[in-house]
Amino acid sequence: MIRFIDDWLNRTTMYRLVAYYLAFLIAVATAFSVVHVLPYDPFALLFTTGFLIAVSWLTNTIFAKAYGVPANIESAYISALILALIITPLTGYSDLLFIGWMAVLAMASKYIFAIRGKHIFNPVAFGAAVVALTVNQTASWWVGTLPMLPFVLAGGILIVRKIRHPGMVFSFLVAAILTTLVLSIGAGDSVANSLQQIVFTSPLLFFAFIILTEPMTMPPTQMLQGIYGAVVGVLFSPQVHLGSFYITPELAIVMGNLFSYLVSPKDKLMLQLKAKVHLGSDLWDFIFVPSRKLSYAPGQYMEWTLPHPDPDSRGYRRFFTLASSPTENSLRLGVRLPSDPSSYKQALLDMNGNSVIAAAQLAGDFTLPHDTRQKIALIAGGIGITPYRSMIKYLLDKNEKRSITLFYAARTVDDLIYKEVFDQARTKLGIKTFYTLTDTMSVPATWKGMIGRINVRMIKAAIPDYRDRVFYLSGPNMMVADFETILLQMGVNPRHIKKDYFPGF
């Protein structure tokens, strides 16, 4: 069952999943309003939602044209749906000004409060915070009600599994609940009532799943994400205040965004295609010229936005690992293009020398250990080889020797890419490389490498000191999960297993 869910999640981008989730919550809330489980007029709820979508889309389109950047329509829809879930549905036409003003501010903040193309604040939270400070009307966060809780929780679990940031969400929840309990005890309030209030009748879970995890405003590494979650969690507690001024959920995330911005990369690049190279089979290299030099660690990834006509259900944003090394002047992507590619990958293939793509949100912990003495084992399946090309090319250019063993599994000989880099590293740096072909019916007679899937016997034979090594796993999600299980059964320390994962692929 879990594999079925993961397979479905892997076919849907993070942004589409969030949009589906929010639309589902609106539908549930509308049904509850019809049967009077929620105290809202269902037509007012739907009208408010439609109005927010229209204003958000229009504002986003105007600002995108004014700033000369691609209009991210998905972002506008998601922001509008979030606003519909935190603003009480209108009770009269006089509410339209308040609702519309919040949507305009949310969309405008992405463009106005941005440095080098990277926006600083969560758009929805910023819009809600400014409206509260200027016209003294606040978001009610009505989605945080008991009838909505099971639906918020069910969909939220899928969101967290998709984005793979449970540590950040957990640190937020623990910090928020503990802060609430400690302050309740200090104030002599009922601990049971305070706990019930923050868990069951507040937007705690919706905030954790949707607001906290907004990818463009979260820090880039797991450690920083954990700190970020804890900081926002403390501020989220309803008892936290400065004198008579109480910190609202939107202010909590805005303040957290400032911390995130200070510790995060600031780059958003517009990249022009330099070359596309057919590496063999259905594998391609896309080489881009950055508008300025990008500083990054080998193995990190970025979000790549490529607007194109008639996008399919997976949209026009993807996360791809950088296959290039920081020592190179270009940025390189290794991409698998099946015979029936998504609209995004088809648009990528159709790019020419005049085409431009946007890259932002540099992040990832799948990087080389700081200790150069640490022994490493790299295991790659298919296109999962891309981060290793980045790492090993970097070591070659720096002439830095490390104890590394690479296992690279591909279906056929034509699927083995970047061999020239790995073969050069074997000669110059002593890196051990083992290639294996998994399609046993297509192995050429001259093949001298291994045959079949990488298994325990292969690993133990190649690296007897495997318990002393940090294992890096990169490839299809099911392959990574299977290898994690195998390594744990072999007695590898769980802290010595690093997995390459990024949301939305």
Image (cartoon, rainbow, N blue to C red):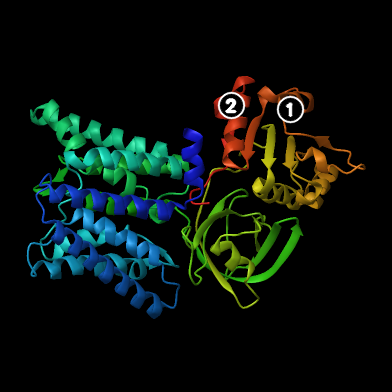
Depth check, front residue: 464 or 383: 383
The residue wearing badge 1 is 459
For the point 57% across and 73% down, the residue is 356
Residue 254, quarter of the rendered image: bottom left
Badge number at residue 282? none
Query: From the viewer's perspective, is 66 left or right of 310?
Result: left
Q: Nearer the viewer, residue 108 or 153?
A: 153
Q: Earlier in the sequence, mark 2 or mark 1?
A: 1
On screen, residue 14 above or below 119:
above
Residue 378 visible, this angle: yes
The residue shown at (36%, 53%) is 20
- State the residue at coordinates (30%, 39%): 153
| Left or right of residue 408: residue 369 | left
Q: Which residue is mark 2?
A: 485
Instruction: Inspect the image, locate mark 2, and give the three-letter code of the amino acid beneath it.
Output: Thr
Q: CB under 8 Å between callouts 2 and 1?
A: no
Q: Examine the rendered structure and indicate whether residue 301 appears above or below residue 94.
A: above
349 or 461: which is nearer to us? 349
Q: Where in the figure is residue 129, as x and y percent of width and height? A: 21, 58
Please tell me whether mark 2 sits on a helix, a strand or a loop. Answer: helix
Q: Amino acid at mark 1?
A: Ile
